[in-house]
Image (cartoon, rainbow, N blue to C red):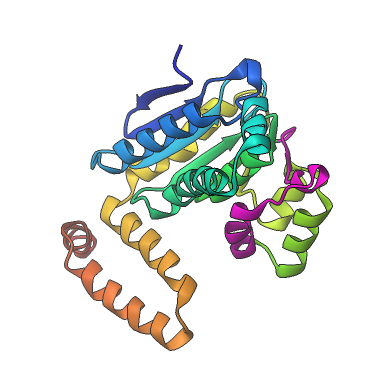
Amino acid sequence: MSELLIENAGAIRLLTLNRPDKRNALNDGLVSELKDALRTADADDDLRAVVIRGAGKDFCSGADLSALQKIAGASYEENLEDAKSLAELFAMPRKMKVPVIAAVHGRALAGGCGLATACDIVLSTETAVFGYPEVKIGFVPAIVTAFLRRNVSEKRAFELLTRGFEFTAHEANFLGLVNRIYPEEGFDVAVLEYSSHYSKLSGSAVRMTKSLLYQMDDVNFDNSIAIGSEVNAEARMTEDCQKGIAKFLER
């Protein structure tokens, strides 16, 4: 049985972590399959969004026992190679053309919470639980720090990363880590309805907006304005924009 299920719902690609007996914990196989699936999705120009979700009771509980045993017995070089593989996975959603949406139910802990944080949008059930508990076992939630620091204030990030407590979906929403909260019943339908909205929008406009937003990370205000001007001009030349303007003028 594959550890990652892949299916389409119209223009939405659904990627389901499929290790329910292990709370969808991340191992080498699942990380590899997920990276391959994201690369394939990014190359598909017909897609408008990608959803990452979990089978069974949980979204993802982080690294599994075999991964922790591997860490304990590996050299620095081996651990660095393994960490870079996980970092590549976490960086992929941000670099992809279409929105990548985490659909979180149950627990999203440690690397599982990191995976959700790395997505563009997080949708959650009311009963979902989040947390970065790595410090409890002497570990550091290191890779996710790059994403968390961009999502919440410095003091909030410090508290979440160094105290290791679990927090609710409503707390995550208050902090800015969750976009929308839905009842557990009907959650899959709600996620699909939310994601499918991107099928009604200009694909080129969404792609350019996503790219522009993340380009702002490393530039100052004046350069941000300059980049925005360039993207504005590029957007005006796209087929979607030309058609949209013509349709508007016909009213």
Is residue 119 among the parts visible in the rendering?
no
x, y percent for residue 233: 23, 75
Q: Which residue lies furthest to the bottom in this view?
A: 222
> Image quarter for residue 123?
top right
The residue under the point 64% across, 48% down is 178
In this rendering, position of residue 206 left or right of residue 1:
left
Residue 90 x, y percent position in the rendering: 50, 47
Q: Is residue 123 above or below residue 120?
A: above
Residue 163 place in picture, x, y as percent: 84, 53
Q: Is residue 134 left or right of residue 146?
A: right
Whether 229 is drawn above or below 250: the answer is below
Name the residue rendered at 55%, 29% in the picture: 27
- Please name whichever residue, 157 or 14, is drawn nearer the observer in this view of the structure: 157
Q: Quadrant of the C terminus?
A: bottom left
Between 75 and 34, the one nearer to me in the picture: 75
Residue 144 counted in the magenta span: yes
The residue depicted at 39 percent of the width and 84 percent of the height is 223
Please state which of residues 34 and 211 is positioned toward the viewer in this rendering: 34
Residue 180 locus on image (x, y percent)? 62, 45
Q: Can residue 141 be seen in this view?
A: yes
Magenta-tinted stretch: 126-151
Q: Is residue 167 magenta?
A: no
Q: In which quarter of the image is residue 40?
A: top left
